[in-house]
Image: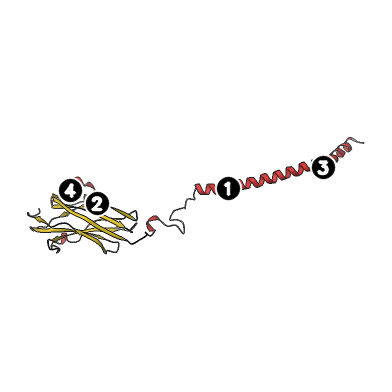
Amino acid sequence: MRPHTHALARRDATLSDPQNHRRVREAARWLLTSWKAAVAFAGGLAVILGLVFHPPWAGSSSGPNAKTVSNQKCPGISKGRISEVKADQSVRLSAYWKLNPGSRANVSKQRQNAIGRVVHFRIDINGYRGRQLTVWWWMLTANGEPVSQPTLQRQLAFALTPHDCSTGGTRDIWVELPKRRGRYQIEVQLLDPSGEKLDYGRTRPFAVRATAS
């Protein structure tokens, strides 16, 4: 028999061996199992990465169904309260600015020398997250009537936009005094975004004994 004939005979014998067939089946089964495990691992890894590394539009306003925190409606009834309204002794505007530099504005020297009262009060707000509210003040007579001087009627103190559904704190503003002597009181108002009055508070009546200059 020729050499190559012996080689073919040995290969045929090897393939016909039952033990070798079993080994081939086990090897094929291992490859199939390993492929499924790799696919499962890759799928699990994708889920984990998806939970940890969010896509760039997650939680952003760029998504079609995304909502910002400020646009989410707060639970309960929306309301605001002004309380503990008190007036300090008379002080010039320039002196108030030294203690509150963030309140400075571009006004004349005559205006800086104007005498007024620093009014302290507390604001408590519920249900207006992300919506602008405004605080105004009025100078009233001791009987609660607005004074005739236009610059002392319905003056804007500041605006605020709450970042939480429920918030509160103390604030102060400088209020110019009337030109005439007499007894007066100051009213502080809190208005909602539509301009409706939510609440107000007044100081106790106080005396203006000298003409403001």
- Which residue is the site of mark 2? 170
Question: Distance between the Cα atoms at labels 1 and 3?
Answer: 39 Å
* Mark 2 or 3, nearer chain start: 3
Residue 58: percent from left, percent from top: 47, 52
- Which residue is the site of mark 3? 18
Residue 177: percent from left, percent from top: 13, 56
Circle 2: is it few (<14), some (14-19), or many (20+) Cα within 10 Å?
A: few
Secondary structure at badge 2 equals strand
Tag nearer the camera, 1 or 3: 3
Label 3 near label 4: C-beta < 8 Å? Answer: no
Tag nearer the camera, 4 or 1: 1
Tag nearer the camera, 2 or 4: 2
Question: Distance between the Cα atoms at labels 1 and 2?
Answer: 53 Å
Circle 4: is it few (<14), some (14-19), or many (20+) Cα within 10 Å?
A: some
- Residue 182 image label: none
* Mark 1 or 2, nearer chain start: 1
Q: Is residue 14 left or right of residue 81?
A: right
- Which residue is the site of mark 1? 44
Question: Distance between the Cα atoms at labels 2 and 3?
Answer: 91 Å
